[in-house]
Amino acid sequence: MALSIGSKKKTAVFISGNGSNLRSLIKFSKLKKSPISINLIISDNLMAKGLIYANIFKIDKKIFKFKNRKLDENKLISELKKNKIELICLAGFMKILSKTFIENFKGIILNIHPSLLPKYKGLNTHDRVLKKKDKYSGCTVHFVSSKLDSGKIILQKRVKISKKETPKTLAKKILKEEHKLYPKAILKTFNL
């Protein structure tokens, strides 16, 4: 992706929950060196706590409940195109996007996942990591492909697992690293 100097890529962030990665991406977008501006927040959950950041930072938000996936995805696609979105960041978005959706935005959808992919794709990663008694876990930012958590890896960060680790403490530890990794991965994506 070539980035023209002085212009920031219009970005949409997709969330389902607390939006802590969204908050970190908003902060990052305000930096001079940042190649993105966050223009749209998308959620599948009307009660997502992260939607508060749309109000705080005066960013447009749209809710798509995905009751009729095909219909909602079509509305979502036209919303993204209407807003001239050039980058999509999935940040704790709990819906799986269709192949058609991904084809429409090929190469411009990023996701952050709380494991060292290709290990532990999907849900309940921290439980699974601890059950396997792994010494390390971490997080991965990758391009989204039509296969779940299988797109090209951009960056990863390893986190050491302590002896008394619980899924909750590990989640907290990894989330801290996610907030640092996502902006770095975006800079790498734009070769900055």
Image (cartoon, rainbow, N blue to C red):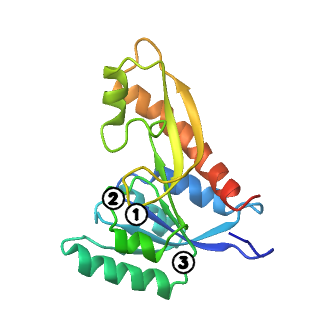
Single out the mark in the foreground, 2 or 3.
Answer: 3
In the rendered view of the protein, which quadrant contains the C terminus?
A: bottom right
Residue 100, compared with residue 26, is above or below; it is below
Question: Along the horizontal axis of the image, is 192 left or right of 17?
Answer: right
Question: Along the horizontal axis of the image, is 10 left or right of 91?
Answer: right
Residue that sits furthest to the right in the current view? 5
Question: Along the horizontal axis of the image, is 100 left or right of 22?
Answer: left
**Residue on which the image places disc 1:** 51
As measured in the structure, the alpha-carbon distance from the residue carrying label 1 to the one carrying label 3 is 19 Å
Instruction: Count neighbours of disc 1 (C-alpha within 10 A) and say few if under 14, some if 14 to 19, many if 20 or more.
Output: many
Question: Along the horizontal axis of the image, is 43 left or right of 112?
Answer: left
**Residue 87, position as x, y percentages in the image:** 56, 69
User: Of the residues shown, which amino acid type is indicated by label 3?
Assistant: Ile
Cβ–Cβ under 8 Å for marks 2 and 1: yes
**Residue on which the image places disc 2:** 48
User: Of the residues shown, which amino acid type is indicated by label 2?
Assistant: Ala
Residue placed most toward the observer, 162 or 27 = 162
Of the two numbered discs 1 and 3 on the same chain, state the one appearing first in sequence: 1
Single out the mark in the foreground, 1 or 3.
Answer: 3
